[in-house]
Amino acid sequence: GNQTILQKSWTMFLLILFTVFLEELLFRGYLLVFLFEKCEIDNQWIGMIVSSVLFGMFHIVNLFQGADILY
């Protein structure tokens, strides 16, 4: 209700920052470690490619839900 544009912008910035941090932690942190240690992938390139493809698939879902491709 009474929030100023600056307060709303600051809140939005923090939410976006948190989301980006969480995605990096999940895909570049947890998933890569899981692939290398639990799945015993020896080649780092394969692990990075698998992680990147899963990251892309995670985001392409937005397109199927009607989001603009440049969104």
Image (cartoon, rainbow, N blue to C red):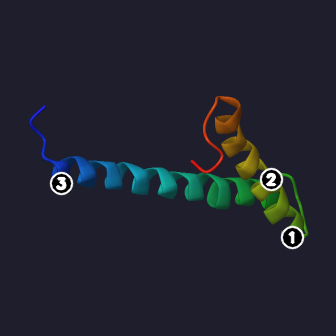
Percent across and percent down for residue 32 are 73, 59
Farthest-out residue, bottom: 44
**Direction from residue 15 to residue 32 in the image, left or right:** right
3 or 2: tag closer to the N-terminus:
3
- Helix, strand or loop under label 1: helix
Residue depicted at 84% across the width and 70% down the height: 44
What's the amino acid at mark 3?
A: Leu
**Direction from residue 35 to residue 5 in the image, left or right:** left
Please, is residue 3 above or below residue 19 in the view? above
Frontmost of labels 3 and 1 is: 3
Q: Nearer the viewer, residue 65 or 14?
A: 65
Report the residue marked by disc 3. 6
**Direction from residue 44 to residue 58 in the image, left or right:** left
Residue depicted at 37% across the width and 48% down the height: 15
Determine the CA span between mark 3 and mark 2.
37 Å
Determine the CA span between mark 3 and mark 1.
43 Å
Please, is residue 63 above or below residue 52 in the view? above
Percent across and percent down for residue 6 are 18, 54
* Viewport quadrant of the N terminus: top left
Percent across and percent down for residue 35 are 80, 55
Please tell me how crowded label 3 is: few (under 14), some (14-19), or many (20+) other residues with Cα within 10 Å.
Answer: few
What's the amino acid at mark 1?
A: Trp
Q: Hey, which quadrant is residue 51 in on the image? A: bottom right
Q: Which mark is residue 53?
A: 2
Report the residue marked by disc 1. 45
Frontmost of labels 3 and 2 is: 3
Determine the CA span between mark 2 and mark 1.
12 Å
2 or 1: tag closer to the N-terminus:
1
Residue depicted at 89% across the width and 61% down the height: 41
**Direction from residue 41 to residue 36 in the image, left or right:** left
